[in-house]
Amino acid sequence: MEKTIKLYDTDAYQTEFTATVLSCHPVSGEDKSSSEVLYKVILDRTLFFPEEGGQDADTGILNEAKVIDVQIKDGIITHITDSPFHPGLSVLGKIDWASRYSNMQQHSGEHIMSGLIHSHFGYDNVGFHLGSQAVTLDFNGFLEKEQLDMIEILANDVIYRNIETIAEYPSTEVLSALNYRSKIELNEPVRIVTFPGYDVCACCAPHIKRTGEIGIIKIIDSFRHRGGIRISILCGSRALMDYRNKQKQTDTISALLSAKPELIAQAVERLKEENFSLRGQIMDLQDTLTELKVAQITEDTKDICLFESDMEASTHRKYVNLLIEKCSGICSIFSGDDASGYRYIIASKTEDVRPVNEMLRQQLQAKGGGSKEMVQGSVNSTKNEILSRFQL
Ligand SMILES: [Zn+2]
């Protein structure tokens, strides 16, 4: 079969096309649980960009059929559709332009970033993924925050300059003398995408005509990855949506904290300090309360089993230590509630408490352990279930 004519190669801005169906077969080996039958459709030509070079495929329609995925192998492009076509039929194809244009913005942004990082730091782009949400770029060298900030500013400067981009198939002679990224020895023509003055790279994907169309390039995340760095970027409309989401978050936090949006970080800092100090006060109060509770227990108490709402671990331990000074038998304190379970400490000055722990483990699947004098653990049971096992 002839290679599919790539209409997107010559005009990235065309959204509709007509083509002839060359073949159509049901997709074999598909998920039997799904009632939907999918078809592999091969056309003589197409505007649908297939999944290639790290970029997701275009979506859209062929006549009434949905194009769910597009793949390429040996130059032949296969459309995965939800209805069949007769070979020889002329079809009208429409690509989802919003998604394609966004991909063009992201992909062109990626070339600018990669070109700048290569020219300033000498690192190569060794990985690229352009999905429906995230755009990630991997480089074989690490960049500090300040270096990324600088690249981001330079990249946006390329946008403001509104430079015309060029996608072409240079002759073999021109190509062999050309210095470009992603250089690979191929027996077929190599498509070169140029951002004059900033980047020259072999690439098969559709790009924007002028850099101004990218709108903005924003780095939203970066981390060390395989000895280099992985950078997430958003361009154009995706960056705008991200800005909107983040502004919404900021506005909500700002209203909740009654702080100006530009001061929310300080407000959260204050809130954390306040929270820390309140926690300290709660611990002091819990300590005082436990002392008072222990003071009320009569001197001749032997075994005791108490339930308390969630208390700090240190208070829990102090409570038990106070109790064993007063009670002659086994002291058990369960801290928590029926819904989320209990943490327990069981101690005694006179008896081995490990059998009690073993009983909880066996009967209520508690998790815990310890010494003859003290065991601790947790159990996902209700107060009544626990009490029924303690025949005190
Ligand atoms: Zn590319």
Image (cartoon, rainbow, N blue to C red):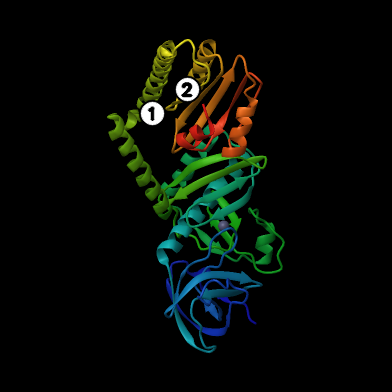
Residue 222 horizontal/vertical position (percent): 54, 40
Q: CA distance from mark 1 to mark 2?
A: 28 Å
Q: Report the quarter where the N terminus lies.
A: bottom right
- Residue 164 shows up from this direction: no
Q: Amino acid at mark 1?
A: Ala
The front one of 197 and 388 is 388
Residue 324 horizontal/vertical position (percent): 54, 14
Q: Amino acid at mark 2?
A: Glu
| Secondary element at tag 1 | helix
The front one of 47 and 42 is 42
Residue 17 position by quadrant: bottom left
User: Neighbour class for label 2 at 10 Å: few (<14), some, many (≥20)?
Assistant: some
The front one of 266 and 340 is 340
Residue depth check, mark 1 versus mark 2: number of the one nearer the observer? 2
Q: Which residue is mark 1?
A: 265
Residue 169 position by quadrant: bottom right
User: What residue lies at 64% left-to-right and 47% top-to-bottom?
Assistant: 124
| Secondary element at tag 2 | loop
Q: Is residue 135 above or below residue 49?
A: above
User: What residue lies at 57% left-to-right and 64% top-to-bottom?
Assistant: 51
Disc with the residue nearer the chain's start (1 vs 2): 1
Q: Is residue 313 above or below residue 242?
A: above
Q: Is residue 56 above or below residue 272?
A: below
User: What residue lies at 40% left-to-right and 24% top-to-bottom?
Assistant: 272
Residue 275 left/right relative to 32: left
Q: Which residue is mark 2?
A: 312
The front one of 39 and 263 is 39
